[in-house]
Image: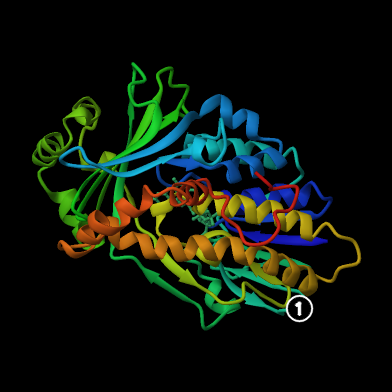
Amino acid sequence: MKVGIVGCGVGGMAAALALARRGHEVTLLEAFDAPRPLGSGLLLQPTGLKALGALGLETMIRERGARVDRLDGRDLAGRKVLDVDYADWRAGGHGIGIHRGVLFDTLYGALTPAGVVLRTGARIVGLHEPHRPLLEDDKGRAHGPFDLVVVADGSASALRPLVRPRSRARPYPWGAVWANAPDPGGQWSGALRQVYDRAEVMIGVLPVGRGPNGETEPQVSLFWSLPVSDMDAFEAGDFEAWKARVRTLWPAVASLLETLPGPRAMARAVYRDVWVGRWSRDATLLIGDAAHGTSPQLGQGANLALVDAVELGEHFGVAGLSVPRAAAVYESSRRWHVMIYQFVSWAMTPLFQSHGGFWAGVRRWLFTPLSRAPGIRQLGAAILTGTARLGRWPDATRP
Ligand SMILES: Cc1cc2nc3c(=O)[nH]c(=O)nc-3n(C[C@H](O)[C@H](O)[C@H](O)COP(=O)(O)OP(=O)(O)OC[C@H]3O[C@@H](n4cnc5c(N)ncnc54)[C@H](O)[C@@H]3O)c2cc1C
């Protein structure tokens, strides 16, 4: 089968590998002239790790990443707001914090050996002939025709409205700025730590292991949550005053702040709440953030994209199944995993990113006490690990 994949991000590269290894002829089309990772660090859950294992890449990732055993979120008074332990999911369970560049390089480096053809500088803007799709880029060049087109062009997908015209992708009013910093003594190892001031301030530190540029010291990703409308002011503002404020809120991050030269060292991250309904139409299928982007509150987006990709390879590896039928089977199998995370991310976001005291009050009086109750703690761990799924896990992705 000839497959065209739009987008050389986590989902697109993983899908290219999963399909090429099933013997399909895969062309991966990327808008940028030189594909590059976006953002600074992310947390791979047991689900994402299992999917990387199915692609033969888990060991490389584990060697470069940092083990994360728990999520520890506190308010300014030091009270625990979030306290989720991977061991509540399974003894020895853990995630891996990883530098995005490392995840990117690992997937990218496997493309050519797997026979994937990469075309860069191809920003796809048109989709023609739905049953045997032909793609058109912004320079008027045609790509295809393909037997299957996989759309993995991220939450701001240009192709999504062409595939599912009634889809919605609402930008979240809040985003974050991120930077990496060295952590020579490994003092941040073992946990994703966050500090909150009501729901208006969220500062986080995630250990991400070694960077992609041969760094010898372990690295961490530091993030600061803020409304998207304040991002320009943040970049133009007094960086030293911001650092002083963060130091006051969370003195332990002082040494990380020292390594940041200015606001441009902090990468912007904005995200969208994507609701598509069905993910496929004829011979075109949406995956990853293009299909189901959410806020990063639960840290699941890349993991969901990796699981999408591996399960796609499974469903399109079955001989005798037509493309629309394989897409429908894929969709009904994936739907109930993804929906849980879309819903919980949507419901939890205002508790951690909103103005005023209302949602912070709900968090303090309802969410935090409830989350400590027996049974709910295990449920929280299942949600954190990405493993909450209604229905059966296929063998290839069962964590
Ligand atoms: C602040 C923040 C923190 C996050 N933290 C985590 C975390 O801890 N754990 C986690 O699992 N996830 C996290 N995520 C989510 C994760 O980054 C995404 O879910 C994941 O990158 C989605 O992968 P994707 O392949 O679907 O899309 P993307 O990674 O966005 O890739 C899309 C690709 O398509 C290309 N493209 C776009 N348009 C076109 C076009 N028209 N033609 C051709 N190419 C195109 C882009 O250049 C890009 O290469 C976070 C996200 C944010 C914003």
Q: Quadrant of the N terminus?
A: bottom right
Q: Residue furthest bottom?
A: 166
Percent position (x, y) of residue 200?
19, 55
Query: Residue 350 versus residue 380: which sits nearer the camera?
Result: 380
Q: Secondary structure at mark 1?
A: loop
* Mark 1 surroundings: few (<14), some (14-19) or many (≥20) residues within 10 A: some
Percent position (x, y) of residue 378?
49, 47
Query: Residue 66 versus residue 217: which sits nearer the camera?
Result: 66
Q: Residue furthest front?
A: 374
264 left or right, relative to 280: left
How was the colour assigned to the protein in this rendering? rainbow
State the residue position of label 1. 131
Compared with 144, 196 (above or below) is: above
Which residue appears at 57% of the width and 37% of the height? 90
Which residue appears at 33% of the width and 65% of the height? 172
Query: Residue 258 versus residue 301: which sits nearer the camera?
Result: 301
Total numbered circles: 1
Which residue appears at 60% of the width and 46% of the height? 47
Percent position (x, y) of residue 75?
21, 44
Q: Quadrant of the C terminus?
A: top right
Compared with 5, 396 (above or below) is: above
Residue 32 in view: no
Compared with 149, 221 (above or below) is: above
247 left or right, relative to 31: left
Amino acid at pointer 1: His
Q: Residue furthest right?
A: 320
Residue 219 in view: yes
